């Protein structure tokens, strides 16, 4: 279960709140990038970036020189899946179907080399499962140039909306088409790097993802 | 042109920066939801939400009672399109192809009724082009319950990465498949609301979007 705090307790649309930790994992594990919120010089900054999860820890990474991450402390990480446009009978009741997770907390800079590599591997696997073992591992110099941050999945909220529009009762008789326009994400055909000199087939971990 | 400020000037990956205002419009106009960054009680908060653009103004909306929007002042709005996973020959050079826009500024609460309706219409049209004219317009009470915020497109940055992986020169001879796995968003078949009592066909503005 996710233990509620004031800011993870939904003030509105309470029926969309999920408090099962499995829902949090599902939303995070289905994503590719998150939106990382930071406060820089008192102003908000929202950066799209990769992430990975190991148990109850979320890992983020960036260049050791990245201005935004040097400022990281208190953060909010949001992962959103837009699943459809909800076309209601009134403009007011138009909505979207979505799954989203928001995680609040203080990031910790990972200093242990093993944890750093595990975190980077998790981030890589989130974007491209199976890829880490297929490619050249990071060198010591590359690791030194990479900042890995850890965020505990302690304070989080999950919101999910699905299903048809909810119209005002008197609007149901309007002669307006209502329903959901689903939105899906699909993988296209892998595009080989023009600089690939040898005849290397698309590996199974990429091929299976496209067909699966 | 987008006039650079310190925080919109990229510290890294300068080659990904775009300074043409048309690029900003293109990234915004292709999106469905943004991630709105706020500072609430000194901590960052990132909320996924709809938006719309009219000229050089971005409109956002929410419930008049929404806790997060009551706190809105200085914001950062980020719109991200993930276009592909860039599979390099090393873990370090793994990347993603994307288009993103970040807008910084102070939001203004829209009080003029005409501007409020225009803003809501723009937000609706961004999610569902053609829908606004097909449905019941907002009532005075619904408008009173809706907060519309305006953000000038003054301080913004656009980043775009596309194309194959950029590997270290010595890695190009590795026997590793490298390339891009494209990611696309598609519309599914419209799902009629089970409560639609009449036989109402899917309207052209929805049908054309799916097929187009």
Image (cartoon, coloured by chain):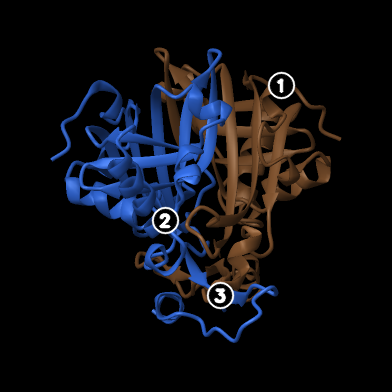
Chain colours: A blue, B brown
Write down the quadrant of residue A60 in the picture.
top left
Q: Between residues B127 and A44, which one lies in front from this camera angle?
A: A44
Residue with the mark numbered 3: A188
Query: How many C-alpha atoms fall within 10 Å of the one at disc 3: few (<14), some, or many (≥20)?
Result: some
Q: Are marks 3 and 2 in contact (CB under 8 Å)?
A: no
Q: Mark 2 points at which residue?
A: A124
> Which is more foreground, mark 2 or mark 1?
2
Which residue extends farthest left? A1
Q: Could you say whether the residue bearing mark 1 is in a helix, strand or loop?
A: helix
Q: How far apart are marks 2 and 1 (CA)?
A: 31 Å
Residue at 47% across, 38% down: A144
> For residue B194, which numbered disc appears in the image?
none
Q: Residue at x 69, y 73 (%)?
A: A195
Which residue in the structure is indicated by mark 1?
A: B6
B194 vs B129, nearest the viewer:
B129
Q: Where is residue A153 in the image (x, y as percent from the top left)?
A: 25, 37
Tell me the chain of label 1. B
Using the image, determine if residue A81 lies above or below residue A68: below
Q: Would you place residue B8 above or below residue A175 in this image? A: above
Q: Which residue lies furthest to the right in this view?
A: B1
Image quarter of residue A74: top left
| Cα distance between the residues tagged 3 and 2 | 19 Å
Mark 3 or 2, nearer chain start:
2
Q: Position of residue B77 (x, y in %)?
A: 59, 33
């Amino acid at each position: 279960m996710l233990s509620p705090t004031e800011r993870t307790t939904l003030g509105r649309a309470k029926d969309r709140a999920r408090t099962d930790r499995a829902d949090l994992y599902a939303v995070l594990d289905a994503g590719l990038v998150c939106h990382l919120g930071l406060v820089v010089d008192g102003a908000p900054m929202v950066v799209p970036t990769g992430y990975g999860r190991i148990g109850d820890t979320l890992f983020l990474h960036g260049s050791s020189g990245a201005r935004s991450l040097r400022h990281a402390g208190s953060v909010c990480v949001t992962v959103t899946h837009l699943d459809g446009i909800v076309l209601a009978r009134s403009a007011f009741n138009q909505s979207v179907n979505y799954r989203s997770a928001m995680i609040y907390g203080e990031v910790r800079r990972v200093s242990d080399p093993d944890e750093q590599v595990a975190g980077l591997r998790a981030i890589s696997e989130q974007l491209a499962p199976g890829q880490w073992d297929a490619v050249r591992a990071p060198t010591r110099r590359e690791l030194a140039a990479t900042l890995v941050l850890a965020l505990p999945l302690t304070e989080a909220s999950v919101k999910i909306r699905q299903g048809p529009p909810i119209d005002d009762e008197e609007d149901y008789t309007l002669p307006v088409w209502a329903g959901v326009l689903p939105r899906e994400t699909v993988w296209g055909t892998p595009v080989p790097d023009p600089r690939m000199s040898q005849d290397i087939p698309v590996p199974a971990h990429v091929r299976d993802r496209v067909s699966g």
